[in-house]
Amino acid sequence: MRRPIKYQLIRLSIAAAGDYPINAEADKTYGKITGIQFTTTDEAALKDAVFKKFDIDSNDIFPEGFEVKLIKSGEDLKPNERWEDLDERADGSTIAGMFTDAGNAAAYPYNARIYLRLANPTE
């Protein structure tokens, strides 16, 4: 039996300031992307870090210049409260974008992760 919710992970390894492409495909066995959040191993890196683009299924989710720190949440929140809500098609949708590191990390390299919450609302 399929789980009602799945968390899909998109990993980025940030070696230096600059642009990092985001290319993934949503799990084909889930119908909806219901949430997103961003984590990093270097909090200082979030200063001025932006998405130049972030699309799901060719829908513009975050505009150019969107500050990534706005979808980052702290450990002081309950896990289910850490999500920026979305209502986008999963079902193999293309996730495409560009993450831009502004050069403020305390140390390079560091890891960044984009988590997608997937669901099948009819189940």
Image (cartoon, rainbow, N blue to C red):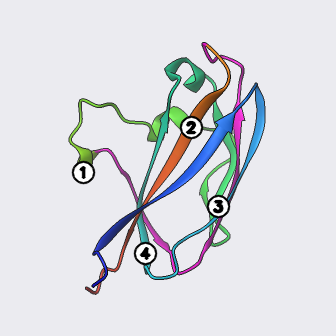
Left or right of 116 in this view: 73: left
Which numbered disc, 4 or 1, marks the residue that appears first in the sequence?
Answer: 4
Which numbered disc, 2 or 3, marks the residue that appears first in the sequence?
Answer: 3
Helix, strand or loop at label 1? It is: helix
Q: Which residues are magenta?
A: 82-106
**According to the image, label 3 marks what residue?**
55
CB of mark 4 within 8 Å of CB of mark 3?
Answer: no
CB of mark 1 within 8 Å of CB of mark 2?
Answer: no
**According to the image, label 2 marks what residue?**
112
Does residue 114 sit above or below 39 in this rendering?
Answer: below
What residue sits 32% from the left and 44% below the top?
82
Residue farthest to the right, as pictured? 18
User: Which amino acid type is marked by label 3?
Assistant: Asp
Q: Foreground: 103 or 64?
A: 103
Q: Which mark is residue 32?
A: 4
Does residue 67 sit above or below 44 in this rendering?
Answer: below
Helix, strand or loop at label 4? It is: strand
In this rendering, which labeled residue sits more in front, label 1 or label 3? 1
CB of mark 4 within 8 Å of CB of mark 1?
Answer: no
